[in-house]
């Protein structure tokens, strides 16, 4: 009788290839189950007993027990984020944020400041409070803001909420800013202004302008600075063709945040 062939394989050999090699070679395959095979395990048995399905995630409910839970498309957009900042951006906690500034929170410049405006509309007693900007003279109002620490100290943008009482044409609004740190002189130069143009629709209707281009705040802001903003009308701009007053009701500024809180 022919001698039996015996083959020995390393524990790293793939089990399927191991068996095929043994059968094809006519060898008796000796396998050490303790090292070549995965021992039976309660956790693996629990996972093997689950029913897989699309958008499901397995998890352990206890020692040797498991279940599946929903894994939504939105949850996956968080799981693939590399760090906390990316996750906060996905959640919308950081990024572009808006701040509403009613016109009444501004103060008129002593030099060529806009006129106070307070009117009750006739039919339903709606009160409008703001500033009236001349159609012939450049006028401006200002505000001081302590922006949150979440602000990334980069550029800002703005849009105006305004109306008018008569006439027709376009209105050009302008904004510029200056940052002031501790011990800085407050009487310093402004950053470059940006403008936004809007056109009349109907007198005493709400007008919401487009968003401006990015405004670079003067004096290189840092976290914790006081920021001065000046909002004005530019009648000398060729696109400003409304000869009557433009009534500013409020402004939204848009900042970019880079943290989830002000800690």
Image: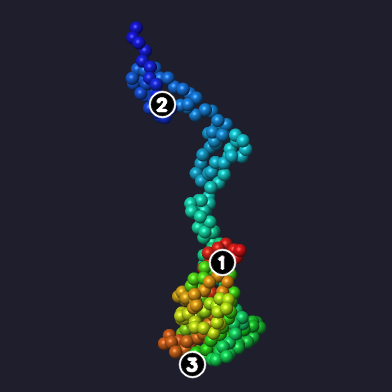
The residue positioned 40% from the left and 28% from the top of the image is: 13
The CA distance from mark 3 to mark 2 is: 93 Å
Sequence-first tag of 3 and 2: 2
The residue positioned 61% from the left and 35% from the top of the image is: 63
**Where does the N terminus fall, quadrant-wise?**
top left
| Residue 155 coordinates in the image, percent (x, y) | 48, 72
Q: Is residue 5 left or right of residue 44?
A: left
The residue positioned 43% from the left and 87% from the top of the image is: 237
Mark 3 against mark 2, which lies toward the viewer? 2
| Mark 3, residue position | 136
Sequence-first tag of 2 and 1: 2
How many marks can you see? 3
Mark identifier at residue 110: none
Q: Is residue 238 left or right of residue 103?
A: left
Q: Is residue 24 above or below residue 149?
A: above
State the colouring used for the structure image: rainbow
Q: Report if the CB atoms under discs 1 and 3 are less than 8 Å apart.
A: no
| Residue 180 coordinates in the image, percent (x, y) | 55, 78
Mark 1 against mark 3, which lies toward the viewer? 1
| Mark 1, residue position | 150
| Residue 153 coordinates in the image, percent (x, y) | 51, 70
Mark 2 against mark 1, which lies toward the viewer? 2
Mark identifier at residue 10: 2
Furthest-top residue in this view: 1
**Where does the C terminus fall, quadrant-wise?**
bottom right
């Amino acid at each position: 009788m022919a001698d039996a062939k015996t083959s020995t394989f390393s524990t790293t050999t793939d089990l399927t290839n191991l068996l095929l090699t043994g059968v094809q070679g006519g060898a008796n395959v000796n396998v050490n189950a303790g090292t070549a095979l995965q021992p039976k395990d309660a956790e693996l048995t629990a996972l093997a007993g689950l029913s897989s399905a699309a958008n499901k995630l397995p998890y352990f409910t206890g020692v040797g027990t498991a279940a599946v839970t929903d894994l939504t498309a939105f949850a996956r957009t968080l799981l693939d984020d590399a760090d906390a900042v990316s996750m906060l951006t996905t959640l919308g906690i950081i990024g572009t944020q808006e701040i509403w500034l009613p016109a009444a929170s501004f103060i008129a410049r002593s030099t060529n400041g806009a006129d106070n405006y307070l009117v009750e509309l006739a039919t339903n007693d709606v009160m409008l409070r703001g500033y009236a900007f001349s159609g012939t003279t450049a006028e401006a109002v200002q505000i001081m803001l302590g922006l949150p620490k979440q602000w990334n100290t980069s550029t800002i943008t703005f849009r105006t909420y305004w109306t008018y009482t008569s006439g027709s044409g376009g209105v050009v609004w302008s904004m510029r800013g200056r940052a002031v740190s501790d011990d800085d002189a407050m009487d310093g130069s402004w950053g470059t202004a940006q403008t936004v143009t809007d056109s009349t629709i109907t007198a005493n209707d709400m007008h919401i302008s487009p968003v401006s281009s990015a405004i670079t705040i003067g004096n290189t802001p840092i976290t914790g600075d006081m920021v001065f903003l000046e909002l004005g009308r530019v009648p000398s701009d060729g696109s400003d063709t409304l000869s009557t007053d433009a009534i500013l009701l409020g402004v939204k500024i848009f900042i970019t945040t880079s943290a989830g809180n002000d800690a």
